[in-house]
Amino acid sequence: MNLIYKITKVEIVKDYTLKISFSDGVVQVIDFGKFLKKSNHPEIKKFLDLKKFHSFNLKSGELMWGDYKLLFPIADLYEGKI
C-alpha cells in the first residue's frame, strides 16, 4: 500500500530546526543545519542565511524555498532523514 502524506504545518523551532506536521498526525523535528553546512553547492549555501532559510513556504503539501530552489523529498522529511 502506497500512502501519500502531505505537510500541514511547519514551525521554526530555532535557527535551522523546523517542526514539521504531516496529514496523518506524525510530527518530525528536523535540523537542516548539518545538511546546509556540508553542502558545497553555492545555491544551497545561500540558505545558511537565516532570513533566507526562514522564507520557506508550503505549496500543495510540500515544504520548499523559493520557486523550487530548495526542496526535500517528502518521504525523507516524513522519516526525519536529512
Image: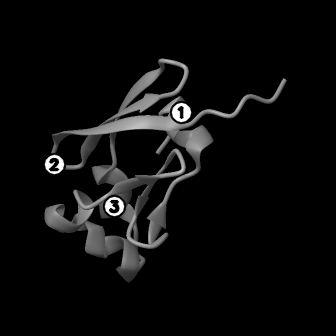
Observer-nearest of 43 and 10: 10
Label 2 or label 3, whichever comes before in sequence order:
2
Q: CA distance from mark 2 to mark 3?
A: 12 Å
The residue sitting at 25% across, 42% down in the picture is: 17
Q: Which residue bears the numbered disc 3?
A: 36
Q: Is residue 39 above or below residue 23?
A: below
Observer-nearest of 45 and 18: 18
| Residue 46 screen position, x and y as percent | 28, 75
Q: Which residue bears the numbered disc 2?
A: 15
Mark 1, other Cα within 10 Å: few <14 / some 14–19 / many ≥20: some
Closer to the eye: label 1 or 3:
1
Q: Are marks 2 and 3 in contact (CB under 8 Å)?
A: no
Amino acid at circle 1: Tyr
Q: Relative to 49, is 40 on the left or the right?
A: right
| Residue 60 screen position, x and y as percent | 54, 50
Snapshot quadrant of residue 66: bottom left
The residue sitting at 31% across, 73% down in the picture is: 45
Closer to the eye: label 2 or 3:
2
Amino acid at circle 2: Asp
Image quadrant containing the N terminus:
top right
